[in-house]
Amino acid sequence: MADTPSIQQAALTNIRVQKWVVYTSITLFLLKVAAYFLTNSVAILTDALESTVNVVTGFTGLYSLRLAAKPRDENHPYGHGKIELISASFEGVLILVAGMIILYESLSNLIHAHPVKQLDAGILIIASTAVVNYILGWWCVNTGKKHHSQALQASGKHLQSDTWTTLGIIVGLILLRFTGISWIDSAVAMIFAGFIMIEGGKIIRSTIAGLTDEADEALLRQLISVLNVQKRQNWIDIHNLRIIKYGSVIHLDCHLTVPWYLNVNEAHAELETLGETISKAFDQDIESFVHTDGCVPPKSCEICPLIDCSVRKAAFTSRLEWTLENITSNQKHGIS
């Protein structure tokens, strides 16, 4: 199945945003290096070292997005979307390592303080990089969420975590500027080193969940809510429902129980309606594979709301409400 134009358009948008991440990361890294040589501040050096991760992951993210945008082929029938998860994992690891380096450098500076100079100019340069990083990070996260790109969201979160680190360093430098207490910038940097290590851990955790096809409980509950509201009379039951994400595409498969006497065309029409209902409820591309089961009287009759069923074997007793437990179970009809 060929990728739809909307998928390709989203992929091109993601690549364009990531290119700006690369260009900006290189520029900001050079500014931070210049600020270090200007001030001799180890805190600024720490920020510059963290920015090298931005540069490396910027290129890695760009590569993964280009690869993820490739159309499906014989060797990759589900597309190349999962490369984004590998890229995001790599970025999470680098963020974690950067936090450890910052912590080490902060402790080292705490023990062996370095004299600083021209703090006013250094603070202005670093503050400007923080503003640019935050705006770019916000753009990446929002675009990544819109187009369901894990790699772009990871880039954005990384840039925003870099912003908080830089702000911590600015606070330290301002306090150092007015108090002359040399250990302040190291103490603040250590606090924010912990913050970005936590952020790196969260990114790793989310990408591992994607790589191992961990069930997205929030997405499943959203889907269940839609199906309970939009349920048609011929949808007697849905069970064995599973969702797997491949980049920006959701692959869904399940078993749909319909009246046993429907012919092939009628049963297929119910499948089409189910797919359309799900697609309208979500703002991303969904590929569904649905298997039809015929109802099994009299047990099916107890949960079947069809009023004009001429072959009913038992009275309708209660409407089956789909839950996370029964819709994902392999138990047919959600009843014993």
Image (cartoon, rainbow, N blue to C red):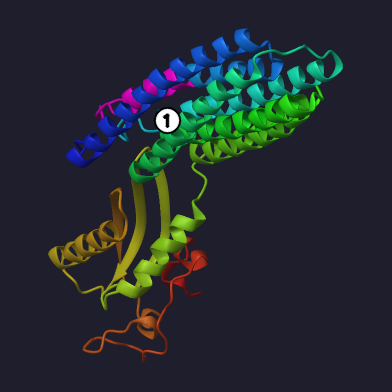
**Residue 239 appears in view:** no
Q: Residue at x 29, y 51 (%)?
A: 288
**Which SS class for mark 1?**
helix
**47 or 272: nearer the viewer:** 47
**Residue 272 in which image quadrant:** bottom left
**Residue type (three-letter) at the residue carrying disc 1:** Glu
Q: Closest to the observer: 51 or 313? A: 51
Return the x and y of residue 45 as percentages of the image width and height: 65, 15
Is residue 173 shown in magenta? no
Q: Pinpoint residue 335: horizontal percent, then vertical percent.
A: 48, 75
Quick one: label 1, few (<14), some, or many (20+) residues within 10 Å?
Answer: many
What x and y, as percent, mark residue 88?
49, 30
The magenta segment is 57-75
Instruction: Give the labeled residue for mark 1.
Output: 84
Name the dominant secondary structure of the magenta segment: helix
Residue at coordinates 60% horizontally, 24% vertically from top-left? 123
Residue 58 magenta-highlighted: yes
Q: Quadrant of residue 255?
A: bottom left
Between residues 38 and 68, which one lies in front from this camera angle? 38
Q: Position of residue 113 (x, y in %)?
A: 81, 14
Using the image, determine if residue 70 lies above or below residue 137.
above
- The image quadrant that residue 320 belongs to is bottom left
Query: Is 253 left or right of 5, judged from the image as shown?
Result: right
